[in-house]
Each structure stands twice: as C-alpha cells, then as structure tokens.
Amino acid sequence: MLGGDFERLAGAAIHAREVFDGRTIWQVSSTSRGGGVAEMLQSYLPFASGAGVDMRWLVLHESERFFEVTKRIHNLLHGYPGDGGSLGEDEVRLYEEASAKSGACLTEMISPDDIVFLHDPQTAGLVPAVKESGATVIWRCHIGVDQSNPHVDEAIAFLAQYVGQADGCVFSRPDYIWDCLAVGRIYIVHPAIDPFSPKNQALDEDVINDILTTLGVREGIRPESPPRFQRADGTTGQVERRAEVLQSGLIPDAVPLIAQVSRWDLLKDHGGLMTAFAEFAPGNDAHLALIGPSSGAVSDDPEGEAVYTLLKDQWQKLDCDISDRIHIINLPMDDLDENAVMVNALQRRADILVQKSIAEGFGLTVAEGMWKGRPVVASAVGGIRDQIVDGESGILIEDPRDLSAFADAFRRLLADPELARSMGEAATARVTQNFLSLPRLADYADLLIKVESADRA
Ligand code: UDP
C-alpha cells in the first residue's frame, strides 16, 4: 500500500460519507464463509464503518435444491457442465420462486435511497425486486472465463434476464464482461486481500508451529497455552481446535511442504494436484497438504462433500510411500478468525503454494500466498494470469491439465532456493502494488458516485 493510496482512500471516504449520508449500502451474498466473496466482504465492512458509511451484509438462506441449481450455473459460467443438469423450466421456476421470497424479505428492509450490491449468480434473481423498490442495484460478478463456450452462453442467457435490469454491473476483469449487457454501466474492480486480517497478518515462526501442532498436522507436543493472534476486531484470539485430517503421519519440520488452499470443488482440481505430486515425489522427501473448509461448512456449495469423498478414495488408492506424504486437511469453520489464522499459518509453513484450478475467477488464495512471499505455482487461467508474472513473481502453467509441468515446477523451485526466494519477494511486491484491499475500497466509492451521477443524468 502506497502513500498515494492512503490519500486517495481518505479523499474517497470523505466524499462517500457525504454522498451516502443517511443511506445504507447493502451487500447480499450466498454464504458468510469459505469462499472469496465472503473473504472480501469480511474485510470491507469494518473499513466502511470506519469511514462512517453504513454498510450491512445479508446472506441468502435458501434450500439445498436452490444451491444445486446455482452451483450448476456457477460451473456453466466457468465453462463446465458441472452436474450435467439443465437450466430448464423447473430450474427457472425454482430459482424465481426462491428469489421472489428472498426479494420480498430484502425489500422490507431497504429504503429507496439505499444501494444494494448483489454478489454472483445466486443473488441475480433479486435484481428485479430491488429495482422495483426504488433502491440502486448493482450486480457484482466474481467469476468468468477467458474464452466463452456454449456452457457459458447458457448461464449468461439465464442470468441476463435479471442482471440486465441492474443499475450497474461490476466484473473482476475486462475479459469477463458480457456482450449482451448495456455498455455505460459496467465497471471493473479487481479483487484484493486485506493485509491486516487474521488470514494475512504476520506470524512468528513459533506461532506458526504451535498452530500446526494444535491442528494435529505437525510433529511436536501440543503447546501448553494456545497460540494467540489478533482478531479482525483487534482483540486477541486463540487457536484451540483440531482439524479433521486424512493422513497416515504428521508433517516433519525438516521436509519441504507444497500446499493448496481451496474449497472442495472439482474446478480446483485437488485430484490432479495429487497425481502431479505422485509424479514428482519419488527421489525427494516433500509433503503435500490439501487444505479446505470442513466439509459441509460452506452453505452455497453442495458439491463439497462429494468432492472430498472422491479425494479420499483417490488418496486411499495411492502407494503408501506417496499417501504417507499427503495430508488432506479439513479446517474447522466454527470461528472464522481462527479458521483464517489456520490458513495463514499453513500458507506460511509451505515452501511452495499451488493453485491448480481448471478455471478461476480471480483466486484470492494466489494473492494470499504471494503476499506471504511464497512462490506460487498456478494454472494460467482467469484472474491468476493478472496476478502472477510468469518466471518473476511465480510460475504459471499454461495448460492446467499438464501434470508434468506442475511436477517440473516443484522440482525447479525446490532445487533452487534462491529462485524460490526471489520469486517470493517479487510476489510480495506485486501484491503490495496491485492487490491490497484499501485502494479497492476507493474504487468502490468512485464507482458508487459514478452510478449515482448516471442515475441523476
Ligand atoms: N478459505 C478459507 N478457509 C478454508 C479454505 C479457503 O478461509 O478452509 C478462503 C481462502 O483463504 C480464500 C477464499 O477462501 O480467501 C477462497 O477464495 P478464492 O478466490 O481463492 O476462491 P473461491 O472459493 O472464491 O472460488
């Protein structure tokens, strides 16, 4: 974060306070935990209230069937068939009925002067109700693909009927903008990470070790007093919970660790990463950690448990000399700050972080790893391309299904600690320059002011 950014943010905060005085900015998303949207909203809200802006966050409470349909839309929008189901009349009816109910609850709470941000496909069906209430409605799309295909077109055709009525739409990258939307009310805001959050705050090595021992993944005796960290609200928190881990042994301190943090989602391709690790593992003593939220904890992601079961089966079929070095870690989600600092400690323990996604809207986990000075090896897809400069601040693998290329990258980095160190250093600098959250808040303040002026024109 640079001096100019602080000045810009301070100016934007004053302006936003004036423009939005007496009005509320609502954020509506489909889960309060376990994904990139929740991660960003958790960090934006305190900053907004610190700036004197009344921002509130509502989370959809919908049926499992609704989230099955929206997960299908999510997969299609990433260019994949997902569960292979259609978006026919039944799905439209279910989506619209649920959206009408949630829309009615929402419009009881909001005033015509308010601004409502609706996040991702799960909330798009609320656009018409919010619009009718007189409030300003902005749809924020966090996902997209580099190249469209018939699956993407199907999802867009479904969503555009609602989204087209919004006062503005925000995408993460220019490539993600839908051709069918009216120009003039489309904005680009890059996702970003909060450097002060429990997820990204600096941690001493002792604390990292104690967190990993407490989790039950590191060799060593559980600390007498629980490791402490600073919570998002500034108070002190403690790490006390164990993770549910699939492993046949612990991670020794002396071995290199390769790790990926992700929801249990097929598009994150944990399975492919395990296979790439199996190719790379002979002849070295590295371990692999696959880290995700405890299964079933992410309310809008009905596929999580099934994906986790597939991984478990794959792990059980591996030769013991490989599976003994793979740890599949389900982090407890009871306390979100505690979960965040667990992710932080694991990312900092890792020598290499991986994001082996087949598709990725942005990939906050990439920025998180880069911020911590780790070399990140990632598929060259979606927003990951914007984050890593290949060979400088990490390694991009052009074809996400090229397992040997991932294995080669691991070999290269572990054989050359100086290369790993310099990539990590460049990665921290790149995130500092481009992907921290405070400047993005100023972008949002500017955006709201633009939407307001467009409305008055
Ligand atoms: N995450 C977390 N706890 C977990 C697993 C993931 O907090 O157990 C976070 C992760 O650190 C990141 C976010 O969930 O901040 C995932 O965002 P990303 O953009 O990488 O992917 P998405 O889940 O939105 O597809």
Image (cartoon, helix red, strand yellow):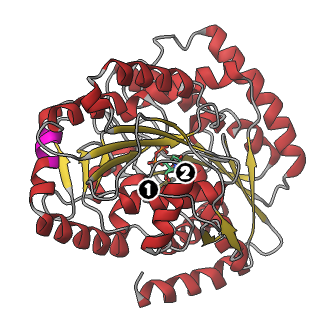
Q: Which residue sits furthest right? A: 108
Q: Which residue is mark 1?
A: 346
Q: Nearer the viewer, residue 131 or 14?
A: 14
Q: Secondary structure at mark 2?
A: helix
Q: Position of residue 417 (x, y in %)?
A: 14, 65
Kindly check if marks 2 and 1 are in contact, taking CB atoms under 8 A apart as contact: yes
Q: Is residue 407 magenta?
A: yes
Write the residue at 31% across / 39% down: 325
Residue 429 in view in this figure: yes
- Residue 316 vs 453, above or below: the answer is above
Residue 62 in which image quadrant: top right
Q: Nearer the viewer, residue 341 or 25?
A: 341
Q: Which residues are magenta?
A: 405-410
Q: Is residue 318 magenta?
A: no
Give, as a three-letter code, the residue at label 2.
Answer: Leu
Q: Position of residue 65 (x, y in %)?
A: 68, 18
Around disc 2, counting alpha carbons within 10 Å, would you say few (fewer than 14), some (14 to 19), or many (20 or more)?
many
Q: Nearer the viewer, residue 224 or 448?
A: 224
Residue 35 in which image quadrant: top right
- Residue 127 vs 23, above or below: the answer is above
Residue 168 in view in this figure: no
Give, as a three-letter code, the residue at label 1.
Answer: Leu
Report the side of 220 relative to 22 (left or right).
Answer: left
Write the residue at 58% across / 31% down: 301
- Does ligand 1 reach within 8 Å of label 1's beta carbon? no
Write the residue at 50% across / 72% down: 201
Residues under labels 2 and 1: Cα distance?
Answer: 10 Å
Tell which tag, 2 or 1, sits nearer the viewer.
2
Q: Position of residue 333 (x, y in %)?
A: 65, 46
Q: Which residue is mark 2?
A: 215
